[in-house]
Image (tube, grey):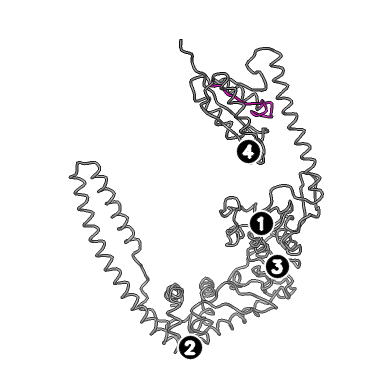
Amino acid sequence: MRIMKKEGVIYTRVSSQKQVSEGNGLSSQHSACLRYANENNIEIIGSFQDAAFTGQTADRPGIHELMDFVESRAETTWVIFDDISRLSRNASDYYFIKFYLLKHGGRLICLSENLISQDPIDELKEHFSIGLAQFDRKRNQQRVNARMRERVRAGFWVFRPPIGMVFKDKLLCEDGKNSVLIKQIFNDFASGRHPTYESVKSSKIARQLINPKSLRPYKLKEDQIKRLLTNKIYVGVIDYPKWGIKGVAAAHKGFIDPRLFQRVQERIKGKGKKKYSSIGLEHFPLKGDLECGSCSQKLVAQYSTGRNKKYPYYRCNSSKAVCKSSPKSVRREVLHDEFRRLLKSARIKTELLELADRILADTFNKRSAHQRDIKSQNDLKLASLGKRREEQLEKVIAARNLSVIAKLESEIESIDSQIEALTAHEPLEDDLSAFRASGCRLLKQPDLAWEEADVTTKKLIVDFVFEGNLKVAKGRIGTAQYSLPYRLLAGKKAKSGSLVDLLVQNWNQLYPYLVRLRDLELVQLG
Ligand SMILES: [Zn+2]
């Protein structure tokens, strides 16, 4: 008579990384189980392990694989492990795993306990063992928690280090990579450069933060930005509200200056402040284009509530704690006069514009000739590709051999992608051959053009002439950044005779401005 061979698997678990890396634990458990299997004529057909997982939770990949494996088999599976606590150190999890395995044809062999016997004494011993394992675990946890609590009270951070910090000799210190970016984020937030969590989140700096584990950029959400900006650990102070720990001076040194941290907290507190009623752009055309030179907050537009007369003015509404600029309010007329002066100084002389026109015309011609070349070459390529495609298609229809068909199909696919690439990259450039810089009022007399424009066009003009917002400091508009056409044409450089070089070198950046300028002149300024 042939004896049915018993089939079984081995499950092992160790809880600490140290046990895993030093190699003991798992292999000694495994060899003990293997010995048992050999002695009892059980063929081992699989083994499952959880390394560095605690028995506190059933959320371990190895135990799930074990349960799936046993469930997948029609035959009885002997599940061998060296101690009850390997399955779980939590009584309810233990019984869940046990009955799940039994239900799906598992037979449990515990080397230290007889789980097969029906003897009530053995059953009681099993309850004791798992009860003891749970008790051990909880008491251990208590001890660990008490020790951790004491350490945190003494100023030592014992949890995962925050972004930008690492442990060195059990002390937090800045990592020198993310920490540099975090300093910048604090500065940008305090200065108003990125005044909201949203704008911090999408800033270039925040997107450079790299997760040291995955070596990929973090995908931070807004509430994580908030936590980062309010985390006192960066100034060397420990809060752990869950344990009632607050304001403990940390043993480590923070890398954010406490005053900078304070400024950020004040900004956060001020975020929810009520907004001022929006006053029409007809009265304050520069609203939205002016910012405080000291705190970078946009200036609001207001009327003073005088008894007889109301005075219009622009104002930085940041609190004194955030912004120490003075005066905070500037009369509307003062800033408007300044602004007209700035526009006037952007005027470009007609001779220069005429010279520029000759250069532009030359460049346009060269480019359009070049483009015509590319276009006609592309058209030729497209025609030949189209012909080739037709031919291959006909062959496919005629072919009988499957591998030949497959080869032809893949060639057609490649032809299609070439056609797609050629048509997609077909350069489409606005035709600027009729464009004359010398005919542009915005270049010749931007100040007068602004004066006469309606509210919407006024905004477009400011956008076109200046780069970024205009900064107001000490009641005046500070040095303004003009946009590229004015920088190239109105500056001293233009007179040096190198205008050709300047325009050609900056062509790629200049081109979009010229298109905008043409559209502005056509539609808005007539
Ligand atoms: Zn300010």
> Mark 4: which secondary structure?
loop
Q: Earlier in the sequence, mark 2 or mark 4?
A: 4
Indicate the position of residue 116 as horizontal and vertical percent values.
62, 16
The residue beneath circle 2 is: 349
| Ligand 1 located in image quadrant | bottom right
The crowd level at tag 4 (other Cα within 10 Å; few <14, some 14-19, many 20+) is few
Q: Earlier in the sequence, mark 3 or mark 2?
A: 3
Distance between the Cα atoms at labels 3 and 1? 33 Å
Given this view, does label 3 or label 4 mark the residue nearer the observer? 4
| Residue 512, quarter of picture | bottom left
The crowd level at tag 1 (other Cα within 10 Å; few <14, some 14-19, many 20+) is many
Indicate the position of residue 497 as horizontal and vertical percent values.
46, 89
The residue beneath circle 4 is: 23
Q: Earlier in the sequence, mark 2 or mark 1?
A: 1
The residue beneath circle 3 is: 317
Q: Is mark 3 within 8 Å of ligand 1?
A: yes
Distance between the Cα atoms at labels 2 and 4? 82 Å
Indicate the position of residue 109 as horizontal and vertical percent values.
61, 21
Given this view, does label 2 or label 1 mark the residue nearer the observer? 1
What kind of residue is marked 4? Gly
| Residue 381, quarter of picture | bottom left
Q: Which residues are magenta?
A: 77-92
What kind of residue is marked 2? Lys
Q: Earlier in the sequence, mark 3 or mark 1?
A: 1
Dot 2 and dot 4 residues touching (CB under 8 Å): no
> Mark 1: which secondary structure?
loop
Q: Is residue 523 visible from the viewing direction of this image?
A: no
Given this view, does label 3 or label 1 mark the residue nearer the observer? 1
Dot 3 and dot 4 residues touching (CB under 8 Å): no
| Residue projecting furthest to the left | 398
